[in-house]
Image (cartoon, helix red, strand yellow):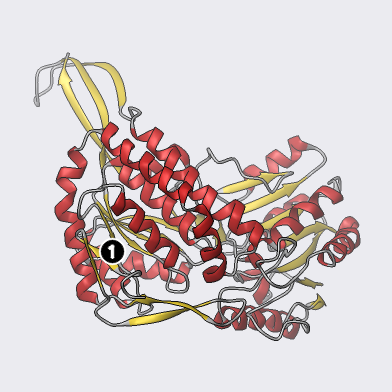
Amino acid sequence: MASKYQLLIGGEWVDGANGTSPVINPATEQIVDEVPEASVEQALAAARAAQEALPAWAATPARERAALLHAATEKLQQRRDHLVPLIIAETGATAQVGSRMQVPVAVNRFREYAELAIQDHDIALPPSATPNTPLAPGGLIGAVVARQPVGAVATISPYNFPLVNQAGKVAPALAAGCTVVMKPAPQDPMAVIELAQILDEVGFPPGVVNIITSADPAPAAALSSTRDIDMVSFTGSTGVGERIYEAGASTMKRLLLELGGKGAAIVRDDADITLAVGALASVWGFHSGQICTAPTRAIVHRSRYDELVAGLQAAAGRMKIGDPTQPDTVIGPVVSAIQRERIEHHIQAGADEGATVLIDGRRPEHLDTGFYVGPTLLTDCTADMTPVKQEIFGPVISVLAFDDDDEAIAIANGTDFGLYDYVFAGDAGIGYEMARKLRSGNVGLNTAQRNPNTAFGGFKMSGIGRDGAVFGLHAYTEMQSIVWPS
């Protein structure tokens, strides 16, 4: 197994210095395979390799970088039938999520950044008339803001969408002329290792792409502090993001941090309740609630409260929970026993604080094996309750009532997070004005759908920076101003 799943450091595939660790199938609780455990020394070696490969890769013509990204796109597509069941096995994703939202999205991201790589992203400025100064003679001074690769990047991804998230980091970084050290989540790193194999096979030069894996946090921490890494791109919990921020301060690391969310869905008195219920329900069970954009707080006008709750109750009854390989399964397992216990703790905390557990998804009776949590609905909630304030990352919705729009905005803005909120309003103009008042990086107005061309990221403790589409490419660049006399 070690010959298949190894570390890639400076163009060489090597075993983990600290042995291997098992990857557990969340549905069966069986070992899928063994993956390498990198040492801190190997993490630092990968960082050095990325730094040493940087000058030549940054100088590589954009069309050559794009050609390699296109080759990776084709190879990913060719391996779809292998990668989909692998991702289902290691993540617990349902067949629908694995086949439609994991591998195909990763393919699209490589294709997108291959095309963006050859575009000119510099900003030409018109000449500026400048008077004589003690500094220099005056005249017409021309300028351009050039985008230069930020450097060697550590790309640290979460367990919910391991392949997609790495693709959204690695592809724009490579397109911009950066080198990378990939560090996937320890729960499900196998598809990401296979992505590294693909990038190696299609011909990325040694050191341009590296990968380490480890369940021990020390190797990832080393990437956050070494001077050989210029930027950390991390998606995950706010707590880990804080530690990365602190570790990178002494070397002025550039950071792209997409952290926790506690999405609010404001449902006004004039909202289309059927639309609101459908949007909430679609994200409620999606990937077992393990999605940072989920609207886990339904903030509902008091006059529509009972109607919305009844709609959610009915929707929960239509969500099949069970074997993720079955095509009609809506909710599969969460990623691990630890995560299941964490979700259950939040549900119990809500009950202890006075919430009504109207639908209790803990330990579904018909499932003896697997880390399952069914859709859970907490009603009679208040803004100060634990499951209302803290990110749960599971299929749990808390419902709160409000009496006027200002109160709804205050409740929505009343957490430390600000990643993705929603407004459902019959009057779209009022809904738009409410959206502008939300302290959130993203707002869905009468929809749970996303626009793939927008900038994605959060306010407050939900992170720093933006990725997605051209904004993602720009995130891996530094702006360099060059001026000259016209």
Q: Residue at x 24, y 75 (%)?
A: 40
For this rendering, which residue is in front, 257 or 269? 257
The amino acid sitting under disc 1 is Gly
Q: Which residue is pictured at 44% across the width and 62% down the height?
A: 191
Where residue 287 sits: x, y (%)?
63, 63
Quarter-of-image position of residue 288: bottom right
Tell me if residue 417 comes above or below residue 127 in the rendering.
Answer: below
Is residue 416 shown above or below 406?
below
156 with respect to 358 (left or right):
left
Residue positioned 35% across, 53% down in the render: 198
Which residue does the numbered mark 1 point to in the structure image? 248
- Point out residue 479 in the picture as x, y percentages from the top left corner: 28, 38
Which sits in the foreground, 220 or 308? 220
- Position of the C terminus, as image quadrant, is top left
Quarter residue 319 falls in: bottom right
- Tell me if residue 303 comes above or below residue 453 in the rendering: below
124 vs 405, nearest the viewer: 124
Where residue 257 sits, quadrant-wise, is: bottom left
The N terminus lies in quadrant: bottom left
**Percent coordinates x, y for residue 136 in the rendering:** 9, 22
* Count of marks, rendered view: 1
